[in-house]
Image (cartoon, rainbow, N blue to C red):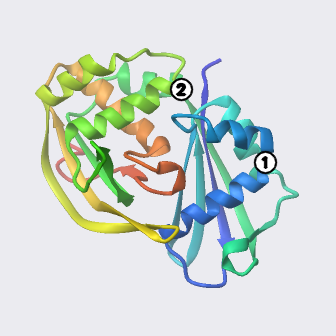
Amino acid sequence: MSEILARIDMQIEIKEKADYNISSVLQGVMMEKIEPEYAGKLHDTAVNPYSMIFFKEGDKYIWRINTFNNEAKEKIIDVFMNPELKDFTIKHRNNETVKILEKTLKMTTYDDLVEKYYLTDSKRYININFRTPASFKSNGKYMIYPTTRTIFQSLINRFSAYSDKISLDVNDLLENFENYSEITDYRMRSTRFHLEGITIPSFIGEVTIKITGPQMMVNLANMLAAFGEYAGIGIKTSIGMGAVEINRERRGVKNA
């Protein structure tokens, strides 16, 4: 059976106002809830098998955790799906008790992504909405703007680390994506992500990429983008950065 991509959305009741910068604190909560042995394993993992995002939807606060393989689902998401887990404490907010009001679970598989995007003629335009601040790092410096290379490098590295279906050659693919893709539109601004007393230069907003290469490359790009809705793009996605949504209904993309 194909490895599972899973997502839990938890609607929570939080006393003080909060935004995506609280994600690093929530990561600490997650580490406290999972088995210590697995938490230790995650600390030693080069590419984490999970990402998270905290956001407000209307008047609701949502904490979302995504996992990229069966083990991470079992060790992380299944813990939070336990009906007996109804609240948790945030030590860094004066030991505030946070109630979990509702939980929803969504799952897919790498097989599903391959069938839906890679084995189907997909669209040449991909609109990526960066919902939380994103950044890349190169030669010790933060990059506060995306390029097709940095976007696809991030996606390929994570996909290759956990997919059980397709083996991707990073170097060849990056060269192809550099040659046969371009950013055709963007609506972005620079911002900062706050992390334990430091700020990380970053960007937020939308970018549209056109794939000009063969149809198989178009399909691969769309499959990786769909994977990105679970994995995120860029650095520190495990603490809430680089959360993305693929806008499949945007005018000019839907009918491309």
Does residue 242 appear to the left or right of 96 in the view shown?
A: left
Q: Quadrant of the C terminus?
A: top left
**In terms of secondary structure, where does tag 2 sit?**
helix
Residue 7 coordinates in the image, percent (x, y): 60, 46
Mark 1 touches mark 2? (CB < 8 Å): no
Q: Is residue 211 above or below residue 254?
A: above
> Residue shown at 79%/67% (left/top)?
87
Q: Residues within 10 Å of mark 2 (few under 14, many from 20)?
A: many
> What residue is pinned by disc 2?
162
Amino acid type of disc 1? Val
> Does residue 89 lie above or below 65 as drawn?
below
Q: Residue furthest front?
A: 140
User: Which quadrant of the figure has residue 160?
Assistant: top left
Q: Is residue 134 left or right of residue 190?
A: right
Looking at the rendered structure, the kind of residue marked 2 is Tyr
Q: Quadrant of the N terminus?
A: top right
Q: For the residue labelled by badge 1, is the local secondary structure a helix, a strand or a loop?
A: helix
Asked whether the viewer can see residue 184, the reply is yes
Question: Residue 32: percent from the left, percent from the top?
Answer: 76, 55
| Residue plotted at (43% across, 53% down) | 243
For the residue carrying disc 1, how many other residues have a C-alpha within 10 Å: few (<14), some (14-19), or many (20+)? some
Does residue 2 appear to the left or right of 177 in the view shown?
A: right
Residue wearing tag 1: 79
With respect to residue 251, does 226 lie above or below?
above
Residue at the spot x=44%, y=36% of the render? 227
